[in-house]
Image: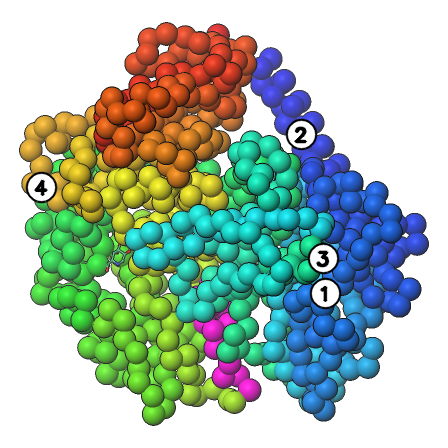
């Protein structure tokens, strides 16, 4: 009976979602205007009398009713009056630099299950065809924009000096921008700034972000977490990117973003085309919580690699903090044995296992096992680890080479470099030029062989140097400055090819911590190493921001001996922090005493009990660490019958200080069933969902570095 009802409900939801998609793009009676709607937003495009494609502001559905409204070009170009930031700048073969676009045709097609509007324009005189795409994701309150350009001529190249993915304009107002930037060890730090007349740019120029292209724009002064208008977005790209927030004196704000064309150009020969990456733009009236819900559900439900999308992530052990480069079979097996006793499911050997890798000065590029450290190869060790009941994973850094390696000695021209210029090393390494096909083939063969020869179920893919010296000496002059674009294309291809060949292998994305986390990587990797900073207090901040933008089942967090602020937090506290994502352990656990082992075993067992809710549930950031000295995260099952609440106290307010005594003790939860009664493990009492959401539960922690995990189960 229950199942029948569920099937009926699912059927109804599927019908509604199809209906929402069918209605998502409405074509005007004259066939020259389009209304695009998501659950909360409205966006209208029109062909003007002059044949230009104009858009009215992106925002709530009332936009569609505006009369006498200001319009802006859907694709602002270099040409004519200068207004706003152009998305497109080209030079035609005769040296003309202005573009004049004119409407040609439209089409509504289905792209990966969602309706997309494709509008084609072309230059009035020159052979340039431009198709702009808008794919509508109604239930996520987002639209996705990208552009394809073609040289339809017979001779002469068109030089593309800039081509962004999409632009939207906001209604006139005073706005504040929040974006997430950082440096190594302090990833995803939220930054909020007023938008004033001029351009605020967020960008990456060296392949490393330590932050995100995701942003939120709100009317000035509005900061209710659960209500209010928010425009948001994110770019699906892992190379250099740029997003401009361009405000006019009159108060219009244009948001425009895509690949960063700084020191980059594409030359389109006759018949050649170029497509930009996709940029998401969203609008919600449910405050920052609405943004999190849209971005996180979309990533979890549509983007993550399908093969592992719905699988629970294993509990990991990673050897880096225990051994650094000093790895050998005996010690790895000793670590694995203890890991297995604690309840770990996946044992990962980090850096140090390959030929010549005695320290960070040598070895990168030579991807066969180091016979000095593993005289019998990896196989016997993996077999023993598997016999313990553990899966085995391994660290690689495909994109890099140490000058002290056989690979570099044989192919010094395979790295990014300019003749007569210094090759800038970082961590004693250089970047391989993945734009070259021979480099890609070498990497593919190396890792395909590694995965074929060994029972490896997990790859940690690292990338530790920023991009310098982007010279591609063997390319033609025309191709030189596409090097970054080709690199990223080939990086994606390499990962995709390996994943296709080895479908059950999990892939972790790492870049000196969280240096390259974005929605394009999310669609190719199962999870991310978020930061090299594993200090639990710093981690609470980093995790809070990460969980604003990305799903918890992509956030790997290890319990390690790191204690950056010398506060000596307890092992239990560290576990409670790491249990908010995909739990891992990184200590030298062979040195643990019985008490530590007992504590870890209990915590891992508790994690396994709550893991489904943590990894698959909806996240509510009840209190952010940026608001005070505590952090509270709530995870709730889809059916709302189980919730896990992580409570963390940090250092600043000590027990019985004025700040602590005066702080409100009640914590209001979110997203529960109002009428249901929830039993709270450890409190031994039951409360209605309504009570927990409107009155709240008592914050149970006193003193510094304390934590508590509440498990709430609906009992009736
Ligand atoms: C940087 C990563 O962020 C670390 O976790 C570790 O894998 C090291 N590289 C290894 O060299």
Q: Tag 4's secondary structure?
A: helix
Q: Nearer the viewer, residue 351 or 261?
A: 261
Tell me the residue at 72%/57% (across/down). Answer: 250
C-alpha gap between disc 3 and disc 4:
65 Å
Q: Which of the numbered marks, if any, corresponds to residue 13?
A: 2
- Circle 2/circle 4 CB separation < 8 Å: no
Q: Secondary structure of the magenta portion, mostly?
A: helix
Mark yes or no: residue 88 visible.
Answer: yes
Q: Mark 1 highlights which residue?
A: 75
Residue name at image x 41 percent, y 8 percent: 686
Answer left or right for 186 relative to 256.
left
Given this view, does label 1 or label 2 mark the residue nearer the observer? 1
- Closer to the chain start, of discs 1 and 3, is 1
For the N terminus, the image quarter is top right
Q: Is residue 575 left or right of residue 68?
A: left
**CB under 8 Å between discs 4 and 1:** no
Q: x and y percent of residue 152 in the render? A: 74, 79
Q: Secondary structure at mark 2?
A: helix
Q: Position of residue 153 (x, y in %)?
A: 75, 83
Magenta stretch in the rendered image = 478-493
Q: Is residue 120 above or below residue 335?
A: below
Ligand 1 shown in quarter: bottom left
On the image, which quarter does residue 628 sit in?
top left
**Dots 1 and 2: beta carbons under 8 Å?**
no
Specify which label sits upstream in the sequence, 2 or 4. Answer: 2
């Amino acid at each position: 009976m229950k199942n029948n009802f569920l099937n009926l409900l699912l059927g109804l939801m599927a019908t509604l979602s199809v209906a929402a998609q069918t209605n998502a793009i409405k074509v005007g009676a004259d066939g020259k205007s389009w209304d695009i709607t998501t659950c909360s937003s409205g966006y209208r495009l029109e062909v003007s009398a002059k044949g230009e494609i104009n858009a009215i502001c992106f925002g709530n559905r009332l936009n569609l009713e505006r009369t006498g409204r200001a319009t802006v070009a859907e694709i602002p170009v270099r040409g004519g009056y200068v207004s706003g930031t152009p998305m497109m700048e080209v030079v035609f073969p005769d040296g003309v630099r202005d573009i004049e676009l004119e409407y040609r045709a439209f089409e509504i097609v289905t792209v990966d299950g969602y309706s997309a509007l494709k509008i084609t324009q072309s230059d009035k005189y020159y052979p340039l065809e431009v198709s702009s795409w808008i794919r509508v994701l109604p239930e996520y309150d987002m639209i996705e924009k990208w552009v394809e350009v073609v040289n339809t001529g017979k001779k002469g190249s068109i030089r593309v000096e800039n081509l962004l993915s999409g632009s939207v304009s906001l209604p006139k107002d005073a706005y504040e921008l929040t974006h997430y930037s950082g440096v190594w060890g302090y990833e995803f730090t939220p930054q909020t700034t007023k938008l004033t007349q001029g351009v605020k740019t967020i960008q990456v120029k060296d392949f490393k972000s330590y932050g995100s292209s995701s942003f939120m724009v709100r009317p000035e002064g509005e900061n209710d977490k659960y209500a209010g208008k928010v425009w948001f977005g994110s770019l699906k790209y892992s190379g250099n990117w740029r997003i401009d927030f361009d405000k006019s004196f009159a108060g219009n704000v244009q948001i425009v973003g895509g690949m960063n064309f700084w020191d980059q150009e594409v030359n389109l020969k006759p018949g050649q085309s170029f497509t930009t990456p996709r940029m998401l733009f969203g609008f919600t009236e449910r405050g920052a919580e609405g943004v999190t819900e849209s971005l996180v559900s979309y990533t979890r439900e549509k983007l993550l690699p399908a093969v592992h999308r719905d699988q629970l992530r294993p509990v990991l052990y990673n050897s880096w903090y225990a051994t650094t480069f000093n790895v050998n079979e005996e010690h790895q097996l000793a670590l694995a044995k203890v890991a297995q006793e604690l309840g770990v499911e996946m044992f990962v050997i980090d850096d140090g296992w390959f030929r010549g890798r005695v320290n960070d000065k040598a070895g990168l590029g030579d991807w066969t096992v180091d016979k000095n450290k593993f005289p019998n190869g990896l196989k016997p060790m993996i077999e023993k680890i598997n016999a313990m009941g553990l899966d085995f994973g391994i660290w690689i850094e495909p994109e890099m080479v140490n000058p002290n390696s056989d690979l570099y000695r044989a192919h010094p021209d395979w790295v990014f470099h300019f003749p007569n210029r210094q090759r800038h090393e970082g961590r004693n390494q250089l970047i391989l030029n993945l734009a070259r096909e021979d480099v890609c083939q070498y990497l593919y063969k190396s890792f395909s062989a590694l995965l074929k020869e060994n029972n490896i179920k997990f790859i940690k893919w690292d990338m530790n140097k920023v991009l310098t010296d982007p010279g591609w000496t063997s390319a033609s002059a025309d191709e030189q400055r596409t090097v970054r674009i080709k690199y990223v294309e080939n990086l994606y291809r390499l990962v995709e090819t390996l994943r296709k060949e080895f479908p059950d292998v999990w892939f972790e994305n790492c870049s000196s911590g969280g240096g390259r986390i974005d929605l394009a990587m999310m669609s190719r990797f199962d999870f991310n190493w978020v930061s090299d900073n594993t200090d639990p207090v710093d981690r609470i901040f980093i995790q809070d921001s990460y969980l604003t933008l990305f799903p918890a089942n992509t956030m790997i967090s290890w319990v390690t001996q790191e204690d950056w602020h010398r506060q000596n937090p307890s092992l239990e506290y560290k576990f409670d922090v790491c249990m908010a994502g995909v739990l891992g352990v990184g200590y030298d656990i062979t040195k643990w005493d019985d008490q530590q082992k007992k504590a870890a075993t209990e915590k891992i067992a508790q994690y396994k009990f709550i893991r489904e809710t943590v990894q698959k549930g909806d996240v509510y950031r009840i209190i952010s660490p940026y608001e005070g000295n505590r952090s509270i995260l709530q995870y709730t099952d889809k059916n709302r019958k189980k919730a896990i609440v992580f409570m963390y106290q940090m250092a600043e307010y000590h027990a019985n200080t004025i700040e602590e005594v005066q702080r409100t003790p009640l914590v209001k939860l979110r997203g529960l069933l109002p009428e249901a009664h929830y039993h709270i493990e450890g409190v031994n009492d039951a409360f209605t969902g309504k009570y927990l959401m409107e009155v709240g539960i008592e914050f149970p922690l006193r003193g510094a570095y304390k934590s508590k995990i509440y498990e709430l189960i609906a009992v009736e």
